Protein backbone atom coordinates (compact mmCIF):
# COMPACT_ATOMS: atom_id res chain seq x y z
CA UNK A 1 0.00 0.00 0.00
CA UNK A 2 1.34 3.42 -0.92
CA UNK A 3 1.84 5.98 1.82
CA UNK A 4 -0.72 8.29 0.28
CA UNK A 5 -3.39 5.60 0.71
CA UNK A 6 -3.30 5.78 4.50
CA UNK A 7 -5.97 7.81 6.31
CA UNK A 8 -3.66 10.31 8.01
CA UNK A 9 -0.20 10.87 6.61
CA UNK A 10 2.64 12.40 8.57
CA UNK A 11 4.49 15.60 7.77
CA UNK A 12 7.53 14.35 5.93
CA UNK A 13 9.69 17.16 7.26
CA UNK A 14 9.58 15.58 10.74
CA UNK A 15 12.12 13.10 12.06
CA UNK A 16 9.50 10.40 12.60
CA UNK A 17 8.86 7.45 10.35
CA UNK A 18 5.46 6.44 9.07
CA UNK A 19 4.92 2.88 7.91
CA UNK A 20 1.88 0.84 7.00
CA UNK A 21 0.91 -1.45 9.85
CA UNK A 22 -1.68 -4.20 9.94
CA UNK A 23 -4.82 -3.54 7.93
CA UNK A 24 -3.08 -0.76 6.02
CA UNK A 25 -3.01 1.66 8.95
CA UNK A 26 -0.03 3.94 9.40
CA UNK A 27 1.87 3.99 12.69
CA UNK A 28 4.52 6.42 13.84
CA UNK A 29 7.90 5.17 14.99
CA UNK A 30 10.47 7.19 16.91
CA UNK A 31 13.71 5.50 17.83
CA UNK A 32 14.53 5.62 21.49
CA UNK A 33 11.04 6.47 22.69
CA UNK A 34 9.66 4.05 25.24
CA UNK A 35 6.04 2.91 25.28
CA UNK A 36 3.66 4.88 27.43
CA UNK A 37 1.14 3.20 29.68
CA UNK A 38 -1.88 5.05 28.32
CA UNK A 39 -2.92 7.48 25.61
CA UNK A 40 -2.99 10.31 28.15
CA UNK A 41 0.47 9.79 29.64
CA UNK A 42 2.06 12.10 27.10
CA UNK A 43 0.73 15.12 28.97
CA UNK A 44 3.00 14.21 31.88
CA UNK A 45 6.17 14.37 29.81
CA UNK A 46 8.00 17.49 28.80
CA UNK A 47 10.05 15.78 26.12
CA UNK A 48 8.77 16.95 22.74
CA UNK A 49 9.70 13.68 21.01
CA UNK A 50 7.93 11.70 23.72
CA UNK A 51 4.81 13.84 23.35
CA UNK A 52 4.78 13.52 19.57
CA UNK A 53 5.08 9.74 19.65
CA UNK A 54 2.28 9.40 22.16
CA UNK A 55 0.14 11.72 20.10
CA UNK A 56 0.06 9.33 17.19
CA UNK A 57 0.11 5.88 18.81
CA UNK A 58 -1.94 4.68 21.77
CA UNK A 59 -0.59 1.44 23.24
CA UNK A 60 -4.05 0.71 24.62
CA UNK A 61 -5.24 -0.29 21.15
CA UNK A 62 -4.85 -3.98 20.43
CA UNK A 63 -3.90 -3.91 16.76
CA UNK A 64 -3.37 -7.64 16.56
CA UNK A 65 -7.06 -8.52 16.78
CA UNK A 66 -9.35 -7.37 14.01
CA UNK A 67 -12.13 -9.89 13.51
CA UNK A 68 -15.29 -9.29 11.53
CA UNK A 69 -18.11 -8.61 13.97
CA UNK A 70 -21.76 -9.24 13.07
CA UNK A 71 -22.87 -6.17 11.16
CA UNK A 72 -24.15 -3.33 13.32
CA UNK A 73 -26.70 -1.24 11.40
CA UNK A 74 -25.10 1.95 12.74
CA UNK A 75 -22.26 1.41 10.26
CA UNK A 76 -24.20 -0.09 7.36
CA UNK A 77 -26.20 1.48 4.52
CA UNK A 78 -29.82 2.41 5.15
CA UNK A 79 -32.29 -0.29 4.07
CA UNK A 80 -34.28 1.87 1.65
CA UNK A 81 -34.18 5.35 0.18
CA UNK A 82 -37.28 6.64 1.93
CA UNK A 83 -39.69 5.64 4.70
CA UNK A 84 -42.42 7.52 6.53
CA UNK A 85 -44.89 6.54 9.23
CA UNK A 86 -46.35 7.11 12.68
CA UNK A 87 -44.43 5.63 15.59
CA UNK A 88 -45.81 3.76 18.58
CA UNK A 89 -44.73 5.36 21.83
CA UNK A 90 -43.75 3.76 25.11
CA UNK A 91 -44.00 6.23 27.96
CA UNK A 92 -45.24 9.78 27.44
CA UNK A 93 -43.94 12.60 25.27
CA UNK A 94 -44.58 16.01 26.89
CA UNK A 95 -47.56 17.83 25.37
CA UNK A 96 -45.50 21.01 25.05
CA UNK A 97 -42.99 19.34 22.69
CA UNK A 98 -44.35 20.51 19.35
CA UNK A 99 -42.03 20.88 16.41
CA UNK A 100 -39.66 19.06 14.10
CA UNK A 101 -36.21 17.64 14.69
CA UNK A 102 -34.16 17.03 11.53
CA UNK A 103 -30.90 15.08 11.65
CA UNK A 104 -28.26 14.80 8.95
CA UNK A 105 -25.51 12.24 8.47
CA UNK A 106 -24.06 9.53 6.21
CA UNK A 107 -26.43 6.72 5.30
CA UNK A 108 -25.31 4.98 2.07
CA UNK A 109 -21.81 3.50 2.05
CA UNK A 110 -22.00 0.75 -0.55
CA UNK A 111 -22.07 1.73 -4.22
CA UNK A 112 -21.44 -0.79 -6.98
CA UNK A 113 -20.52 -3.49 -4.49
CA UNK A 114 -17.67 -1.44 -3.05
CA UNK A 115 -17.59 0.06 0.44
CA UNK A 116 -16.63 3.61 1.26
CA UNK A 117 -13.30 4.04 3.00
CA UNK A 118 -14.30 6.47 5.71
CA UNK A 119 -17.40 7.15 7.79
CA UNK A 120 -17.51 10.65 6.25
CA UNK A 121 -17.79 9.21 2.72
CA UNK A 122 -21.36 7.96 3.15
CA UNK A 123 -24.10 9.72 1.18
CA UNK A 124 -26.38 11.91 3.26
CA UNK A 125 -29.49 10.45 4.86
CA UNK A 126 -31.93 12.90 6.46
CA UNK A 127 -34.19 11.88 9.34
CA UNK A 128 -37.26 13.89 10.33
CA UNK A 129 -39.07 13.52 13.65
CA UNK A 130 -42.28 15.53 13.95
CA UNK A 131 -43.69 15.93 17.46
CA UNK A 132 -47.30 17.06 17.86
CA UNK A 133 -49.62 16.86 20.88
CA UNK A 134 -47.78 13.90 22.40
CA UNK A 135 -47.53 11.99 19.10
CA UNK A 136 -44.54 11.31 16.85
CA UNK A 137 -44.22 10.68 13.10
CA UNK A 138 -40.91 9.85 11.45
CA UNK A 139 -39.44 9.98 7.99
CA UNK A 140 -36.06 9.39 6.42
CA UNK A 141 -34.93 10.21 2.89
CA UNK A 142 -31.76 10.48 0.86
CA UNK A 143 -30.49 13.95 0.10
CA UNK A 144 -30.53 14.19 -3.68
CA UNK A 145 -27.10 15.71 -4.16
CA UNK A 146 -25.50 15.58 -7.59
CA UNK A 147 -22.82 13.27 -6.17
CA UNK A 148 -25.43 10.81 -4.88
CA UNK A 149 -27.50 10.87 -8.08
CA UNK A 150 -24.42 10.29 -10.22
CA UNK A 151 -23.30 7.40 -8.02
CA UNK A 152 -26.71 5.71 -8.24
CA UNK A 153 -26.96 6.26 -12.00
CA UNK A 154 -23.48 4.95 -12.77
CA UNK A 155 -23.27 2.40 -9.94
CA UNK A 156 -19.95 3.80 -8.76
CA UNK A 157 -18.46 6.74 -6.92
CA UNK A 158 -18.25 9.64 -9.38
CA UNK A 159 -17.06 12.52 -7.16
CA UNK A 160 -14.14 13.10 -4.86
CA UNK A 161 -15.51 12.33 -1.38
CA UNK A 162 -13.65 12.75 1.90
CA UNK A 163 -11.50 9.62 1.47
CA UNK A 164 -13.09 7.74 -1.41
CA UNK A 165 -12.21 8.86 -4.93
CA UNK A 166 -13.48 7.85 -8.37
CA UNK A 167 -11.61 4.84 -9.69
CA UNK A 168 -9.43 5.20 -12.74
CA UNK A 169 -8.65 2.47 -15.24
CA UNK A 170 -6.14 4.22 -17.49
CA UNK A 171 -4.22 7.43 -18.01
CA UNK A 172 -7.12 9.11 -19.76
CA UNK A 173 -9.49 8.56 -16.84
CA UNK A 174 -6.81 9.85 -14.47
CA UNK A 175 -6.48 13.01 -16.58
CA UNK A 176 -10.26 13.42 -16.58
CA UNK A 177 -10.27 13.16 -12.79
CA UNK A 178 -7.56 15.79 -12.48
CA UNK A 179 -9.39 18.12 -14.84
CA UNK A 180 -12.65 17.56 -12.98
CA UNK A 181 -11.06 18.43 -9.66
CA UNK A 182 -9.45 21.56 -11.07
CA UNK A 183 -12.73 22.78 -12.53
CA UNK A 184 -14.70 21.72 -9.47
CA UNK A 185 -16.93 19.30 -11.40
CA UNK A 186 -15.68 16.29 -9.41
CA UNK A 187 -15.72 17.97 -5.99
CA UNK A 188 -18.55 16.47 -3.98
CA UNK A 189 -21.70 18.28 -2.94
CA UNK A 190 -22.61 15.44 -0.56
CA UNK A 191 -23.89 17.60 2.32
CA UNK A 192 -23.64 15.09 5.18
CA UNK A 193 -22.46 17.01 8.23
CA UNK A 194 -25.05 19.45 9.51
CA UNK A 195 -28.49 20.89 8.90
CA UNK A 196 -29.47 24.41 9.90
CA UNK A 197 -32.60 26.51 10.01
CA UNK A 198 -31.82 30.04 8.88
CA UNK A 199 -33.45 33.03 10.54
CA UNK A 200 -35.88 33.39 7.61
CA UNK A 201 -37.08 29.78 7.93
CA UNK A 202 -35.13 28.22 5.08
CA UNK A 203 -33.37 24.96 5.92
CA UNK A 204 -30.01 24.00 4.45
CA UNK A 205 -27.71 20.97 4.69
CA UNK A 206 -23.96 21.49 4.69
CA UNK A 207 -20.63 19.77 4.38
CA UNK A 208 -17.11 21.18 4.16
CA UNK A 209 -17.13 21.86 0.43
CA UNK A 210 -18.78 25.06 -0.73
CA UNK A 211 -20.74 23.05 -3.32
CA UNK A 212 -22.16 21.03 -0.47
CA UNK A 213 -24.72 23.58 0.68
CA UNK A 214 -28.17 22.32 -0.32
CA UNK A 215 -31.63 23.61 0.55
CA UNK A 216 -34.35 21.16 1.59
CA UNK A 217 -38.06 21.25 2.36
CA UNK A 218 -38.25 20.63 6.14
CA UNK A 219 -41.82 19.30 5.91
CA UNK A 220 -41.11 16.58 3.34
CA UNK A 221 -37.29 16.25 3.28
CA UNK A 222 -37.42 16.81 -0.47
CA UNK A 223 -34.29 18.33 -1.96
CA UNK A 224 -34.97 21.82 -3.33
CA UNK A 225 -31.52 22.31 -4.85
CA UNK A 226 -28.16 24.02 -4.37
CA UNK A 227 -28.14 27.01 -2.03
CA UNK A 228 -26.42 29.59 -4.21
CA UNK A 229 -24.60 32.50 -2.63
CA UNK A 230 -24.93 35.82 -4.44
CA UNK A 231 -21.64 37.32 -3.25
CA UNK A 232 -18.20 37.02 -4.84
CA UNK A 233 -16.32 35.60 -1.85
CA UNK A 234 -15.86 32.29 -3.64
CA UNK A 235 -13.80 29.67 -1.71
CA UNK A 236 -13.72 25.89 -2.14
CA UNK A 237 -14.26 24.92 1.48
CA UNK A 238 -16.18 26.04 4.54
CA UNK A 239 -16.63 25.01 8.14
CA UNK A 240 -19.03 22.10 8.41
CA UNK A 241 -20.56 23.77 11.47
CA UNK A 242 -21.81 27.30 10.86
CA UNK A 243 -23.20 29.01 13.95
CA UNK A 244 -26.76 29.97 13.15
CA UNK A 245 -29.28 32.03 15.10
CA UNK A 246 -32.47 33.89 14.27
CA UNK A 247 -30.39 36.96 13.43
CA UNK A 248 -27.28 35.70 11.62
CA UNK A 249 -25.33 32.88 9.98
CA UNK A 250 -21.59 32.90 10.76
CA UNK A 251 -18.99 30.56 9.31
CA UNK A 252 -15.33 30.27 8.29
CA UNK A 253 -13.88 29.97 4.80
CA UNK A 254 -10.32 28.55 4.64
CA UNK A 255 -7.95 30.52 2.41
CA UNK A 256 -5.49 28.17 0.68
CA UNK A 257 -3.59 30.90 -1.20
CA UNK A 258 -2.79 33.11 1.78
CA UNK A 259 -3.22 30.55 4.57
CA UNK A 260 -5.90 31.66 6.97
CA UNK A 261 -9.64 31.96 7.47
CA UNK A 262 -12.20 34.45 6.23
CA UNK A 263 -14.83 34.98 8.89
CA UNK A 264 -18.16 35.76 7.26
CA UNK A 265 -21.72 36.64 8.18
CA UNK A 266 -24.99 36.20 6.26
CA UNK A 267 -28.23 37.83 7.37
CA UNK A 268 -31.71 36.27 7.15
CA UNK A 269 -33.56 36.79 3.88
CA UNK A 270 -30.40 37.05 1.79
CA UNK A 271 -27.91 34.75 0.08
CA UNK A 272 -25.09 37.27 0.39
CA UNK A 273 -22.18 36.64 2.71
CA UNK A 274 -20.26 39.59 4.08
CA UNK A 275 -16.70 39.56 5.37
CA UNK A 276 -16.29 40.23 9.08
CA UNK A 277 -12.52 39.80 9.17
CA UNK A 278 -9.51 37.65 8.24
CA UNK A 279 -7.40 35.46 10.51
CA UNK A 280 -3.97 34.46 9.23
CA UNK A 281 -2.48 31.09 10.12
CA UNK A 282 0.62 31.26 12.31
CA UNK A 283 1.92 27.69 12.50
CA UNK A 284 3.26 27.08 8.95
CA UNK A 285 2.33 27.46 5.30
CA UNK A 286 -0.59 25.01 5.47
CA UNK A 287 -4.14 25.86 6.46
CA UNK A 288 -5.34 24.23 9.66
CA UNK A 289 -8.50 22.15 9.32
CA UNK A 290 -11.47 23.80 10.97
CA UNK A 291 -14.55 21.62 11.40
CA UNK A 292 -16.15 23.92 13.97
CA UNK A 293 -15.45 27.04 15.99
CA UNK A 294 -16.98 29.06 18.82
CA UNK A 295 -18.29 32.52 19.63
CA UNK A 296 -19.37 34.69 22.54
CA UNK A 297 -21.60 37.74 22.65
CA UNK A 298 -18.76 39.94 21.40
CA UNK A 299 -16.11 37.69 19.89
CA UNK A 300 -15.52 34.91 17.35
CA UNK A 301 -12.91 32.31 18.28
CA UNK A 302 -11.02 30.67 15.41
CA UNK A 303 -8.99 27.53 16.24
CA UNK A 304 -5.77 26.58 14.48
CA UNK A 305 -4.58 23.04 15.19
CA UNK A 306 -1.93 20.72 13.71
CA UNK A 307 -4.48 18.87 11.59
CA UNK A 308 -3.93 20.46 8.18
CA UNK A 309 -5.51 20.41 4.76
CA UNK A 310 -3.29 18.52 2.31
CA UNK A 311 -4.03 19.41 -1.33
CA UNK A 312 -1.28 17.05 -2.52
CA UNK A 313 -3.45 14.13 -1.42
CA UNK A 314 -6.40 15.17 -3.53
CA UNK A 315 -5.98 12.23 -5.92
CA UNK A 316 -5.17 9.59 -3.31
CA UNK A 317 -5.92 9.36 0.38
CA UNK A 318 -7.55 11.77 2.78
CA UNK A 319 -7.33 15.52 2.40
CA UNK A 320 -6.03 15.96 5.95
CA UNK A 321 -2.71 15.21 7.61
CA UNK A 322 -1.35 15.67 11.11
CA UNK A 323 1.67 17.99 11.34
CA UNK A 324 3.49 16.80 14.43
CA UNK A 325 5.83 19.76 14.66
CA UNK A 326 3.19 22.44 14.17
CA UNK A 327 2.15 24.67 17.01
CA UNK A 328 -1.49 25.31 17.93
CA UNK A 329 -3.24 28.64 18.37
CA UNK A 330 -6.55 30.22 19.31
CA UNK A 331 -7.43 33.46 17.53
CA UNK A 332 -10.07 35.93 18.68
CA UNK A 333 -11.65 38.66 16.57
CA UNK A 334 -14.34 41.21 17.31
CA UNK A 335 -17.79 40.31 15.99
CA UNK A 336 -18.49 43.99 15.41
CA UNK A 337 -15.29 45.26 13.76
CA UNK A 338 -13.45 42.12 12.65
CA UNK A 339 -10.30 43.37 14.39
CA UNK A 340 -7.93 40.86 15.96
CA UNK A 341 -8.33 40.94 19.74
CA UNK A 342 -6.05 38.08 20.74
CA UNK A 343 -3.92 35.36 19.14
CA UNK A 344 -2.38 32.98 21.65
CA UNK A 345 -0.33 29.83 21.50
CA UNK A 346 -1.93 26.85 23.24
CA UNK A 347 -0.90 23.21 23.74
CA UNK A 348 -1.44 20.95 20.74
CA UNK A 349 -5.04 19.85 20.51
CA UNK A 350 -7.32 17.77 18.32
CA UNK A 351 -11.04 18.57 18.35
CA UNK A 352 -13.90 18.03 15.96
CA UNK A 353 -16.36 20.01 18.04
CA UNK A 354 -16.39 23.09 20.23
CA UNK A 355 -19.13 23.03 22.84
CA UNK A 356 -19.48 26.67 23.88
CA UNK A 357 -17.55 29.80 24.82
CA UNK A 358 -18.12 32.73 27.14
CA UNK A 359 -16.41 35.85 28.45
CA UNK A 360 -14.99 36.24 31.94
CA UNK A 361 -15.33 39.86 33.04
CA UNK A 362 -13.64 42.11 35.54
CA UNK A 363 -15.89 42.50 38.58
CA UNK A 364 -15.21 46.21 38.82
CA UNK A 365 -15.29 47.48 35.24
CA UNK A 366 -17.37 44.70 33.69
CA UNK A 367 -14.91 44.51 30.80
CA UNK A 368 -13.93 41.10 29.37
CA UNK A 369 -10.56 39.91 30.70
CA UNK A 370 -10.49 36.41 29.20
CA UNK A 371 -12.47 33.96 27.10
CA UNK A 372 -13.30 30.39 28.14
CA UNK A 373 -13.74 27.91 25.28
CA UNK A 374 -14.87 24.31 25.87
CA UNK A 375 -14.22 21.52 23.37
CA UNK A 376 -14.41 17.76 22.92
CA UNK A 377 -10.66 17.25 22.81
CA UNK A 378 -8.55 14.15 22.07
CA UNK A 379 -5.41 15.00 24.06
CA UNK A 380 -3.64 16.34 21.00
CA UNK A 381 -3.89 12.96 19.26
CA UNK A 382 -4.98 12.27 15.70
CA UNK A 383 -5.67 8.60 16.33
CA UNK A 384 -9.45 9.06 16.31
CA UNK A 385 -9.15 9.41 12.53
CA UNK A 386 -7.92 5.83 12.32
CA UNK A 387 -11.01 4.63 14.16
CA UNK A 388 -13.28 6.52 11.75
CA UNK A 389 -12.35 4.20 8.91
CA UNK A 390 -15.31 1.95 8.13
CA UNK A 391 -13.20 -1.19 8.39
CA UNK A 392 -12.58 -0.37 12.05
CA UNK A 393 -16.12 0.70 12.86
CA UNK A 394 -17.33 -2.60 11.40
CA UNK A 395 -14.71 -4.78 13.12
CA UNK A 396 -15.35 -4.35 16.84
CA UNK A 397 -14.71 -7.54 18.83
CA UNK A 398 -14.88 -6.17 22.35
CA UNK A 399 -11.48 -4.51 22.59
CA UNK A 400 -11.29 -1.09 24.20
CA UNK A 401 -9.98 0.80 21.18
CA UNK A 402 -11.68 4.21 21.35
CA UNK A 403 -9.02 6.89 21.98
CA UNK A 404 -9.40 8.90 25.16
CA UNK A 405 -11.05 12.30 24.96
CA UNK A 406 -12.05 14.97 27.45
CA UNK A 407 -13.79 18.27 27.81
CA UNK A 408 -10.81 20.47 27.08
CA UNK A 409 -11.15 23.99 28.45
CA UNK A 410 -9.15 26.78 26.84
CA UNK A 411 -8.49 30.00 28.71
CA UNK A 412 -7.62 32.85 26.34
CA UNK A 413 -6.38 36.00 28.12
CA UNK A 414 -7.31 39.37 26.62
CA UNK A 415 -4.46 41.29 28.25
CA UNK A 416 -1.98 40.94 25.41
CA UNK A 417 -0.47 37.69 26.67
CA UNK A 418 0.94 35.44 23.96
CA UNK A 419 -0.06 32.17 25.61
CA UNK A 420 -3.31 30.55 26.62
CA UNK A 421 -3.98 27.40 28.60
CA UNK A 422 -5.76 24.10 27.94
CA UNK A 423 -6.99 22.10 30.92
CA UNK A 424 -9.42 19.29 31.64
CA UNK A 425 -12.76 20.75 32.71
CA UNK A 426 -14.11 17.70 34.59
CA UNK A 427 -12.58 14.35 35.58
CA UNK A 428 -12.64 12.16 32.44
CA UNK A 429 -13.94 9.20 34.44
CA UNK A 430 -17.23 11.11 34.66
CA UNK A 431 -17.87 10.43 30.97
CA UNK A 432 -15.97 7.15 30.58
CA UNK A 433 -12.81 8.83 29.25
CA UNK A 434 -14.64 9.57 26.01
CA UNK A 435 -16.89 12.48 25.03
CA UNK A 436 -18.00 14.11 21.78
CA UNK A 437 -21.05 15.37 19.87
CA UNK A 438 -22.04 17.79 22.65
CA UNK A 439 -25.01 20.13 22.52
CA UNK A 440 -26.25 22.74 24.97
CA UNK A 441 -29.36 24.79 25.63
CA UNK A 442 -29.09 27.21 22.67
CA UNK A 443 -30.18 30.14 24.85
CA UNK A 444 -26.80 29.84 26.57
CA UNK A 445 -24.68 29.89 23.42
CA UNK A 446 -21.88 32.39 23.90
CA UNK A 447 -22.74 32.83 27.58
CA UNK A 448 -21.67 31.29 30.86
CA UNK A 449 -23.38 27.91 31.11
CA UNK A 450 -23.48 24.83 33.31
CA UNK A 451 -24.75 21.84 31.35
CA UNK A 452 -23.71 20.00 28.20
CA UNK A 453 -25.23 16.86 26.66
CA UNK A 454 -22.95 14.54 24.74
CA UNK A 455 -22.11 11.02 23.59
CA UNK A 456 -20.02 9.41 26.32
CA UNK A 457 -18.57 5.95 26.76
CA UNK A 458 -19.07 2.80 28.75
CA UNK A 459 -15.92 0.82 28.12
CA UNK A 460 -14.76 -1.36 26.51
CA UNK A 461 -15.94 0.21 23.26
CA UNK A 462 -14.81 1.33 19.83
CA UNK A 463 -17.17 4.30 19.60
CA UNK A 464 -19.22 6.46 21.95
CA UNK A 465 -22.04 4.20 23.18
CA UNK A 466 -24.03 6.12 25.79
CA UNK A 467 -25.59 9.53 26.40
CA UNK A 468 -24.13 11.78 29.05
CA UNK A 469 -25.27 14.91 30.85
CA UNK A 470 -22.28 16.95 32.00
CA UNK A 471 -22.51 19.31 34.99
CA UNK A 472 -19.56 21.66 34.60
CA UNK A 473 -20.23 23.37 37.92
CA UNK A 474 -20.36 20.25 40.07
CA UNK A 475 -17.91 18.41 37.77
CA UNK A 476 -20.23 15.44 37.64
CA UNK A 477 -22.35 13.55 35.12
CA UNK A 478 -25.43 11.41 34.52
CA UNK A 479 -25.66 8.53 32.05
CA UNK A 480 -28.19 6.81 29.81
CA UNK A 481 -27.02 3.48 28.42
CA UNK A 482 -28.59 0.68 26.37
CA UNK A 483 -26.26 -2.29 25.95
CA UNK A 484 -25.15 -2.91 22.38
CA UNK A 485 -26.74 0.31 21.10
CA UNK A 486 -25.15 3.34 19.44
CA UNK A 487 -26.97 6.62 20.23
CA UNK A 488 -26.51 9.67 18.03
CA UNK A 489 -26.08 13.30 19.06
CA UNK A 490 -28.27 14.17 22.08
CA UNK A 491 -30.24 17.24 21.06
CA UNK A 492 -31.64 19.54 23.77
CA UNK A 493 -35.01 21.23 23.29
CA UNK A 494 -36.00 23.69 26.00
CA UNK A 495 -39.42 23.92 27.63
CA UNK A 496 -41.29 27.05 26.47
CA UNK A 497 -40.80 29.66 29.16
CA UNK A 498 -38.09 27.55 30.80
CA UNK A 499 -36.90 28.67 34.21
CA UNK A 500 -33.76 26.56 34.46
CA UNK A 501 -30.96 25.86 31.99
CA UNK A 502 -31.77 22.12 31.91
CA UNK A 503 -35.57 22.52 31.84
CA UNK A 504 -36.44 20.59 28.69
CA UNK A 505 -35.89 17.27 26.95
CA UNK A 506 -33.07 15.54 25.12
CA UNK A 507 -33.76 13.69 21.85
CA UNK A 508 -31.53 11.00 20.36
CA UNK A 509 -31.91 8.44 17.57
CA UNK A 510 -30.54 5.09 18.75
CA UNK A 511 -29.45 2.06 16.71
CA UNK A 512 -29.34 -1.38 18.35
CA UNK A 513 -26.97 -4.24 17.53
CA UNK A 514 -29.94 -6.55 16.80
CA UNK A 515 -30.88 -4.43 13.77
CA UNK A 516 -33.60 -2.38 15.45
CA UNK A 517 -33.72 1.31 16.16
CA UNK A 518 -35.69 3.75 18.25
CA UNK A 519 -36.06 7.36 19.29
CA UNK A 520 -35.38 8.06 22.96
CA UNK A 521 -36.58 11.13 24.85
CA UNK A 522 -34.87 11.96 28.16
CA UNK A 523 -35.78 14.50 30.81
CA UNK A 524 -33.22 17.29 30.52
CA UNK A 525 -32.94 17.68 34.30
CA UNK A 526 -33.03 14.15 35.71
CA UNK A 527 -31.67 12.57 32.52
CA UNK A 528 -34.08 9.67 32.92
CA UNK A 529 -35.93 8.13 29.99
CA UNK A 530 -39.50 9.40 29.72
CA UNK A 531 -40.42 7.95 26.31
CA UNK A 532 -39.18 5.91 23.39
CA UNK A 533 -40.62 5.16 19.97
CA UNK A 534 -39.56 2.18 17.87
CA UNK A 535 -38.41 2.75 14.31
CA UNK A 536 -39.10 0.15 11.58
CA UNK A 537 -35.37 -0.72 11.54
CA UNK A 538 -32.06 0.59 12.76
CA UNK A 539 -30.77 3.68 10.97
CA UNK A 540 -27.12 4.43 10.21
CA UNK A 541 -25.33 6.57 12.78
CA UNK A 542 -26.07 10.23 12.12
CA UNK A 543 -24.29 13.45 12.89
CA UNK A 544 -25.97 16.77 13.64
CA UNK A 545 -29.48 18.16 13.73
CA UNK A 546 -31.64 21.23 14.21
CA UNK A 547 -34.98 21.99 15.83
CA UNK A 548 -37.83 23.79 14.05
CA UNK A 549 -40.65 25.00 16.35
CA UNK A 550 -44.11 23.96 15.20
CA UNK A 551 -45.09 27.45 14.10
CA UNK A 552 -42.23 27.32 11.57
CA UNK A 553 -42.13 23.61 10.73
Image: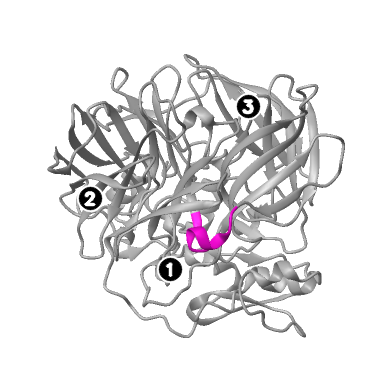
Q: Which residues are magenta?
A: 426-435
Q: Secondary structure at mark 2?
A: strand
- Residue to which mark 2 is pinned: 518
Location of residue 399 with respect to 136 vertically, above or below: below
Question: Where residue 458 sits: x, y (%)?
Answer: 41, 65
Image disc number at residue 420:
none
Q: Does 430 lie within the magenta span?
A: yes
Q: Residue at x 18, y 31 (%)?
A: 134
Question: Where residue 262 sits: x, y (%)?
Answer: 68, 32
Q: Nearer the viewer, residue 380 or 22?
A: 380
Question: Where residue 150 sits: x, y (%)?
Answer: 34, 46
Q: Secondary structure at mark 3?
A: strand
Image disc number at residue 462:
1
Q: Does 171 lie within the magenta span?
A: no
Whole-number angstrom distance, CA of label 2 to CA of label 1 = 21 Å
Question: Where residue 309 sits: x, y (%)?
Answer: 64, 52
Whole-number angstrom distance, CA of label 1 to CA of label 3 = 37 Å
Q: Residue at x 51, y 59 (%)?
A: 430
Quarter residue 232 falls in:
top right
Amino acid sequence: MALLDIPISVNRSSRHLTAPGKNGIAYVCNAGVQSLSSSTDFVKHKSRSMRIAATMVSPSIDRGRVVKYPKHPAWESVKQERWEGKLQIEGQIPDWLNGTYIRNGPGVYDIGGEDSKNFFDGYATLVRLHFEDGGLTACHAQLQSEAYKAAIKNNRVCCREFSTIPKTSNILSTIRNIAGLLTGDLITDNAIISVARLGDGRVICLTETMKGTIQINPNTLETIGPFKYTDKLGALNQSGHPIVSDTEFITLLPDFVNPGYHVIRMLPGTNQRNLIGKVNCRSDTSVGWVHSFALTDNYIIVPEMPMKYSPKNILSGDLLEWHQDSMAYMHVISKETGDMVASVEVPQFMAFHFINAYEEKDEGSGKPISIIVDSCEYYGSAEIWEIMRLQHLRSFVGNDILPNSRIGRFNIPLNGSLRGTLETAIPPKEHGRGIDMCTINPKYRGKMYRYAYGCGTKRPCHYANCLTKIDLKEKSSKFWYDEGSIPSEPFFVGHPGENAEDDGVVISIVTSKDGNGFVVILDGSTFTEIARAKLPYGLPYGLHGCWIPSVQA
